[in-house]
Amino acid sequence: MPPIGRSACLTKLDNNGAVVWNNAYSVLDVTRGAAVRRATDDPTGYVLVGTTETTLGFASSIYVIRTDGAGAPLWTFTYGTDSAHNFMDKVEIKNCDTGYIVTGTVMVESGLGVPEIAGFLLRIDDAGALQWMRIYSQVGVTGFADGAFKDVHQNSVGFVVTGHGVSQFPSGPTQNARDTILFQTDTLGMPLWGKQYANLEGNNSGESLAITADGYAIVGGHLPPLIDNYTTELLSTDSTGNLNWYRRIFTVQDGGSHYQSNVANGTLRVLPPNDELVFVGGTGPDSALLRYDFTGTLQSAQSYDNIGQFGASFLIEPSGGFTLTGPSSNGLNRDYSVIRTDANFLSGCHEGPFSPPSDTPPIEVVDIEYTPINVDVALDRTPVVTPLVWIETVLCQSSICVDPAPIICTLTALDVVITWDPAPVGVVVELWRDGVLLAFVPDTTYTDTPGPGAHTYELHLVDPNPDCDPAISSCSLLVPSIISATATDVLVDFARPTIDEIDVCIADALESVGRSPITGLDLSSLTDLGAAQPDVTPIAWLQLGEFPAQHALTQAEGDQLAQFLSSGGSLYIEGADVAFDPPTALSSMDGVVGVDDGDVFGQVPGVVGLDSGVGFDATAFSASYRGSGRSIDHLSPDGAGAGALFENGGGEGQTTAVFYDATVTGGTHRVLTSSTSLEGYDGDTGGWIAGIVVGLSPPTAEPQFVRGECNGDGLYDIADGIYTLSLLFTSGPDGPCQVACDANGDALIDLADAITTFSYLLLSGTPPAAPFPNCGGDSTGVAVLGCAVSGCP
Amino acid sequence: MKRPAQTLLVLLGLALTTSLSAQTFQRMVGGVFEDEPTCIEHTVDDGYIISGTQSEIVYT
């Protein structure tokens, strides 16, 4: 069987994804294309890197082709060409200040019958001239040496590399053969330091490396022991390789896919402005884009079902979207798939969201060392270039012919003023509110009075060309539902200066139980809270945020809260370090202390409600928790009147919320302190918020009544039976204490109650259920049927 | 607690401006052989350059 012919390809696309030119390149008989970058000395040209070999049995070499902007070769070299070196297909090239750095993996014949596999670095200048090339042998490895380099960046010190090395974890199982490495060299490629991140469970290999604000992030492959099903690892380190955090992500393959593959880098990138980590990977049958925040918490993920098992590479668009590519089957063979998405990973077809689970297995960080071995072989080559004509298929697309116009929403009293930049001539301007067309507006401003609630305005610029899609920009804001002294609750979200989904959720939940919430940006409105509803306990809801963006209460804020509590208010407060901040006047009034034994650190899969024992029973509420996995503090009740309200559902009973009732010790206020956040619960959060309102309010005295005394005249007689019949059959008025009409005590008001009354009064039948004949309570019946006016003293 | 009767105005200047739309697409491009992309990069004219490998394998 003859060898399969392979050629490297460079394909130039325009901004719409249409092919501009397309070439195949053959350096030796078999040539593979691994990565492409813009040329360092002329960004209109390109450098293509890969491996090439002859069909005569010689081992493969690294090649680099420098082309002009039309794909014509300007220079070509091979590196490391000799019979002792066989380079793996996965090769990466990155731009340097001048020239390039190339990395990859090479199999070196040791002469002992067992080759050594090791990473290499290749430094070349802008003309392709070899500056140095070194293969790195891991120190201390006995037996089969299985190392690899996958990605490289130039930094201020030299070059930093990820890949894998032979596991140095001393007590790891036999399946734990290799682990991810981070390796720093100087500018000449001489080793400075190396770290290995040893996961006890299976083999790991860093595939792509990103430079973050304070160090590095790596995405890589993870193969669990004895299970042929790759998962992905994502980890963060500081600038010297010390581990910040580590996530093992299930059901996702990394996009690099191991040293046998020719898939190149571009799989992990840092997304400004919040340093989110975005990488392209796969779900098995589909490719996927995934976004995590800088603490390793999943933000969003989307899969695309017309690509193969993983996406190969992606870009962050200046507009905020993403473009990815990967292999895709057309039914006969594999082609390129190119997908451009918006900022939310949406492309318009063949896609769907998913939510991969993750965990944080124990990781051992160990130092590793390398010994460099020089390779000084570079050969000038002349590639064969063949133009290609390929078929292009558009699966879906949107076509926007004008730029979206940025718009601003401003709240003025109860009006929303929307302003935007002038639209191009001939473009129709549509203003939409909450998905409904509001108006055609030729001007650049519009004033709307939408009513209370959260509203989103969209400006649609509609080009007269019917082939163009509207260019849409939007703004959102919350119009407060109550802007008066009748407010009972104030919501202050210190961590996020804008109203978001959880703020709207809290406000809705409070309104559903008859309260009147307002939102504020600080505590200035606390002193006016509840002015018009003196019988209602005012409650302040404070969200301090999560590590590392939490808000620490100032002394002035502590004083404001203390005064608020002393005046009869109650407080819900949540967030990171909520019980650890520097002491304020609040500290002696909240009945909680932080437990200084570290944090739960990402191991709070759920919270379990408890009976605090001091008047707040939360046993009916438990929920899985998807909040920040970074810093969930342990709390402890402090003193009389305080009790644990939540415990970590996946831990060892650590308390994560404490309720404090100061009335137990002669005070007037109540405080609920939580280290988990309302927005993180997967459950009936609205019901829980309603429960908090009850818990933070004084207990309501149970209404007293006499069973059967339905009409409220103070006598139990025939008139009560008639009143019941009137209530049932002639739409007569409800009794003043409805539960009293439930003569037989079955929590229903029906004909049987009238029969009970008549039977007892006229036929000496069974008397009504308790409370009868004296006043008493029935909390269950009152809860079901109500009792607006107690008929008893 | 101070309970004034006058109206309390709470004004929220909470404006969030985002661009919802960008040009999006899904496209496929390839020939009669196995074509596998490996890397995508922006070009100076706002287009793209993609590297890959063409393998002369035809499935029938």
Image: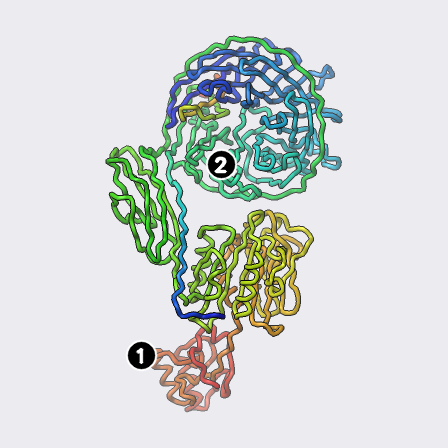
- In this rendering, the answer to whether A717 lies above or below A88 is below
The amino acid marked with disc number 2 is Leu
Give the distance between the C-alpha atoms of the residues marked 2 and 1, in whole angstroms. 64 Å
- Say which chain tag 1 marks: A
Q: Is residue A217 visible?
A: yes
Amino acid residing under circle 1: Thr
A181, above or below A591, in the image: above
Dot 2 crowding, Cα within 10 Å, few <14, some 14–19, many 20+: many
Look at 38% across and 46% down and name the residue there: A475
x, y percent for residue A460: 31, 41
**Which comes before the other along the chain, label 2 or label 1?**
2
Q: Chain of mark 2?
A: A
Residue sitting at x 63%, y 37%: A238
Q: Which secondary structure lies at badge 2?
A: strand
Q: Position of residue A636 (x, y in %)?
A: 65, 60
Residue tagged 2: A289
Res A670 → quadrant: bottom right
Can you name the residue that lies furthest to the front here? Answer: A556
User: Badge 1 is on which residue?
Assistant: A730
Image mark for residue A14: none
